[in-house]
Amino acid sequence: MKILVCVKRVADPNVKVRVRSDKTGVDLSNIKMTINPFDEIAVEAAIRLKERGVATEVVVVSCGPVASQDALRTALAMGADRGILVQTDAELQPLAVAKLVKSIVGKESPEVVMLGKQAIDDDANQTGQLLAALLDVPQATCASAIERDGDRMLVTRETDDGRETVEVSLPAVITADLRLNEPRYVTLPNLMKAKKKPLDTLDAASLGVDIAPKFTTVNVEEPPARKPGEIVLDVAALVARLRQETASN
Ligand code: AMP
């Protein structure tokens, strides 16, 4: 079973990003970038399936500028077999990524395509669902456990009502949630070895899909500064303080 995993290069979640002065987005110049944390979980899940003999090959794909190679190299250092960079400097919205990945699926014919449930920069939570629709294959989103069951996959999902297990026929799209696993640490020797793993680059334009943005961001604002917290001495003081807050609202 071949697994294709989508990885996006995003701003490191531990770094504070600033809104650009024209308020059209955030300023990513000189910002530390990293692999999207949910994609790291998806890569880990795919590698574990390979280590258990369920999967035979793990291919990672990223769409974006040349620098997206960093995210692919991290995934290769974790244990993925090869990488594909779909290179473009254009702004990519979820539908565009889904269309580009669909083209790669056409070339690679994986039985499972894994994505993160969301990219932490746009928080769209759309690409996996759009991809499944474009491919017309089953989707299981927000996976917290994945098992193979014959020619199907059993995917456990955490919902507001508890855990739900869905069975999907293959090929299928699965998106990874936080509790699926704890990704392994990438060691320096493995990063060095990853440099020797195959990494192909394709020009996004050569795939012949319309990646033009479908919406425009009109305004981006910094979140309002949070009021500093207050330490109260005991429960009685806390209750009094809460009553006071409620009365004044
Ligand atoms: P989103 O729908 O933007 O929240 O992204 C959901 C998932 O789609 C991410 O966790 C990635 O697995 C995948 N994805 C989004 N953008 C890209 C990209 N440029 N290249 C590769 N995968 C992506």
Image (cartoon, rainbow, N blue to C red):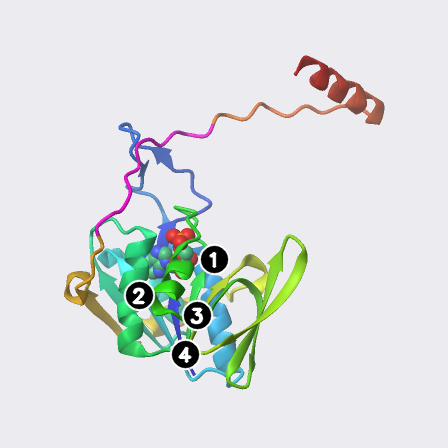
Side of 239 where 53 appears, left or right: left
Separation of disc 2 and disc 4 at Cα? Answer: 14 Å
Judged left or right of residue 89, residue 165 is right
Marks 3/2 in contact by CB < 8 Å: the verdict is no
Checking the image for residue 111, the label placed there is: 4
Q: Which mark is residue 140?
A: none
**Pointer 1 residue Cβ closer than 8 Å to ligand 1:** yes
Which tag is nearer the camera, tag 3 or tag 2? Answer: 2
Do labels 3 and 1 touch, CB within 8 Å? no
Could you say whether the residue bearing mark 1 is in a helix, strand or loop? loop
Confirm or deny contact between disc 3 and disc 4 (CB under 8 A): no
How many neighbours does mark 4 have within 10 angstroms: few (below 14), some (14-19), or many (20 or more)?
A: some
CA distance for labels 3 and 1: 19 Å
Report the amino acid beneath label 3.
Answer: Met
Work out whether mark 3 precedes mark 4 in sequence or the reverse, and give the earlier one: 3
Q: Residues within 10 Å of mark 3 (few under 14, many from 20)?
A: many
Q: Amino acid at mark 2?
A: Val
* Residue 20 percent across, percent down from the top left: 30, 32
Which image quarter is the N terminus in?
Answer: bottom left
- Kindly identify which residue carries mark 3: 78
Indicate the position of residue 54 as horizontal and vertical percent values. Answer: 50, 83
> Which amino acid does the dot numbered 1 rest on?
Lys
Q: Nearer the viewer, mark 3 or mark 1?
A: 1
> Which residue corresponds to the image point at 41% horizontal and 66% vertical from the top-left?
188
Q: Which residue is mark 2?
A: 101
Residue indicated by mark 1:
117
Query: From which residue to which does the magenta span run?
Result: 212-223
Position of residue 247 relative to residue 5, above or below, is above
